[in-house]
Amino acid sequence: MDQRMKQSIILAVDGGATKTTITLRTIQGECLFEKTTTGSNYQTIGVDAVSVILNDLLHGAYLSTKLKSIDVAVFAMAGIDTKSDLEMVTQIIEQSLQNTPFHIENLVIENDVQATLIGLVQNTPGMLLISGTGSIAFGTDGRNRFFRTGGWGHRASDEGSGYWIGRQILKGIFRAEDGLDSPTVLKKLVLEKLKINSVDQLVNWLYHPEYTNSHMASISSVLQEAISLNDEKAIRIAQSAANELFLLVNATLKKLHYDGEPFTLHLNGGILRHDTYIRNELVQFIHQEYPHIAIALCKHNPIEYIVRRAKYALKIS
């Protein structure tokens, strides 16, 4: 490692839909500053709110460290789905940086999933599948070409995600209540989770002014217990979720023209990290079709992969 690399300072921002984390670190890994706050997807909370969040985090980082010279900064932001999104987020970030004393030698602004994937695989082929509140697959051939499948949001897509699972659970409860489907233990588990007593109260919860997508996704946490009780509806929902996630992987592999070379699929997000039934079903689906693909479960917080992305940017700059 040359002298320049030894002294390098990294700034990394993980701007997710539910939380935003900033960290300042040395290239050797010493953490100089780190703070987490609310989500910063401009499509969800608006441009002004994102600006406030970034200004607060950046000023906090400067006041805590008094550093001005940053060798590489990576802003990995949710909501960068199109060219116009990238232009908008770049404008927000550049304006926020102008309000600080920071001088950044190398600035990288990317979709948060793409940045995480690069942090995981760098210049080797691989894929990242996320199922949390939403769902998306992002793959690369290791030659700077990237392909995504899904991630279009809850209104049109996000199959296999926590939001989608929560919606399927509520749909099953309401259909059972109407006599359209057989009774399900999901009703009892959801009412207990929400600390309410009836399906009427469940409707009030669903249409409450403070309802959010994260609230819907949180309903998915009852699925594993229902499966352990052999609830048929819960098992069908889990199997369907695993199949939808497999379809994301399959479509992305086809875009990559995968032909059997060494390849790792990385799994992340609350559903894939914590719901063992869905994860095991998914792995089985994948290995039936692609027996040579390695599958790895992400074990670190997202910011750690963004830091790795920053180190890779410094390495190739």
Image (cartoon, rainbow, N blue to C red):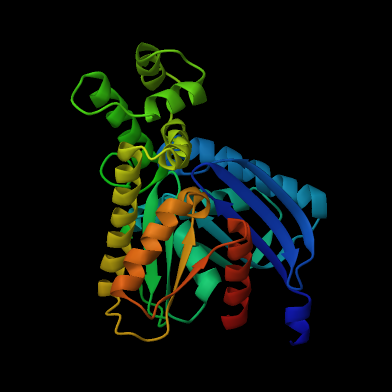
Q: Position of residue 298 (x, y in %)?
A: 55, 62
Q: Nearer the viewer, residue 16 or 57?
A: 16
Task: Look at the picture and state if 219 lies above or below 176.
Answer: below
Q: Position of residue 72 (x, y in %)?
A: 63, 68
Would you identify the image quadrant in which residue 182 lies? top left
Q: Position of residue 158 (x, y in %)?
A: 33, 47
Q: Residue at x 52, y 54 (%)?
A: 273
| Residue 140 visible in the shown view | yes
Q: How many marks?
A: 0
Q: Residue at x 60, y 55 (%)?
A: 13
Q: Residue at x 37, y 56 (%)?
A: 136
Task: Look at the picture and state if 13 lies above or below 133.
Answer: below
Q: Residue at x 66, y 45 (%)?
A: 36
Q: Nearer the viewer, residue 228 or 218?
A: 228
Quarter of the image containing the N terminus? bottom right
| Residue 111 visible in the shown view | no
